[in-house]
């Protein structure tokens, strides 16, 4: 890809880069707050309180894990921007429509590949 194409592509995706960075900051702040939901200052005195605490902690841990995965996807999308691969489906190689990127700026797959469960061997996991 020529330098001219890279600059054009970069400008085209600047709004998406800003969305990704904003979402990254939001997630990092929210995750920091959620860490407090997992820590326990004092154990409850009865079984109902213990069950409620256990459920609350499990929910907080699951939410943190989902947010951590989204954060990884955001970082990967920002990396694809740097290499010029952002906006290209990792499975079929076609351009990901702008509407999909607006809805999910860290999308790695086009709608067709995502809906049929297509994945590729170069996954970021």
Image (cartoon, grey):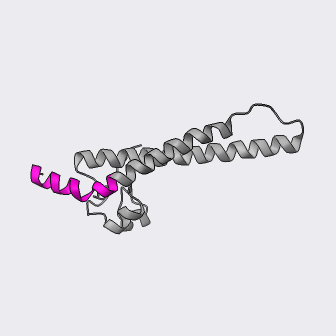
Q: Position of residue 112 (x, y in %)?
A: 37, 68
Q: Nearer the viewer, residue 76 or 121?
A: 76
Residue found 22% across the figure and 53% down from its top: 10
Q: Nearer the viewer, residue 83 or 23?
A: 23
The image quarter containing residue 95 is bottom left
Q: Is residue 35 visible?
A: yes
Q: Is residue 102 found left or right of 2 in the rendered image? A: right
Q: Is residue 2 visible?
A: no
Q: Is residue 90 found left or right of 9 in the rendered image? A: right
Instruction: Tell whether position 7 is magenta.
Output: yes
The dominant secondary structure in magenta is helix
Q: Which residues are magenta?
A: 2-17
Instruction: Tell whether position 88 is magenta.
Output: no
Residue found 62% across the figure and 46% down from its top: 62
Q: Position of residue 122 (x, y in %)?
A: 33, 47
Give above or below for 19 relative to 114: above
Residue found 89% across the figure and 35% down from its top: 45
Q: Quadrant of the C terminus?
A: top left
Q: Is residue 77 found left or right of 37 in the rendered image? A: left
How many labels, in total? Answer: 0
> As drawn, which residue projects farthest toward the right?
46
Q: Position of residue 31 (x, y in %)?
A: 55, 42
Give above or below for 53 relative to 99: above
The image quarter containing residue 82 is top left
């Amino acid at each position: 890809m020529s330098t001219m194409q890279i600059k054009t592509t970069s400008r085209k995706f600047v709004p998406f880069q800003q969305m990704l960075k904003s979402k990254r900051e939001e997630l990092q702040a929210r995750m920091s707050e959620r860490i407090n939901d997992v820590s326990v200052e004092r154990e409850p005195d009865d079984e109902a309180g213990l069950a409620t605490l256990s459920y609350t902690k499990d929910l907080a841990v699951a939410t943190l894990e989902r947010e951590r995965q989204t954060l990884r996807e955001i970082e990967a999308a920002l990396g694809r921007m740097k290499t010029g691969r952002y906006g290209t489906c990792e499975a079929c190689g076609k351009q990901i429509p702008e509407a999909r990127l607006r809805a999910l700026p860290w999308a790695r797959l086009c709608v067709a590949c995502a809906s049929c469960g297509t994945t590729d061997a170069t996954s970021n996991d």
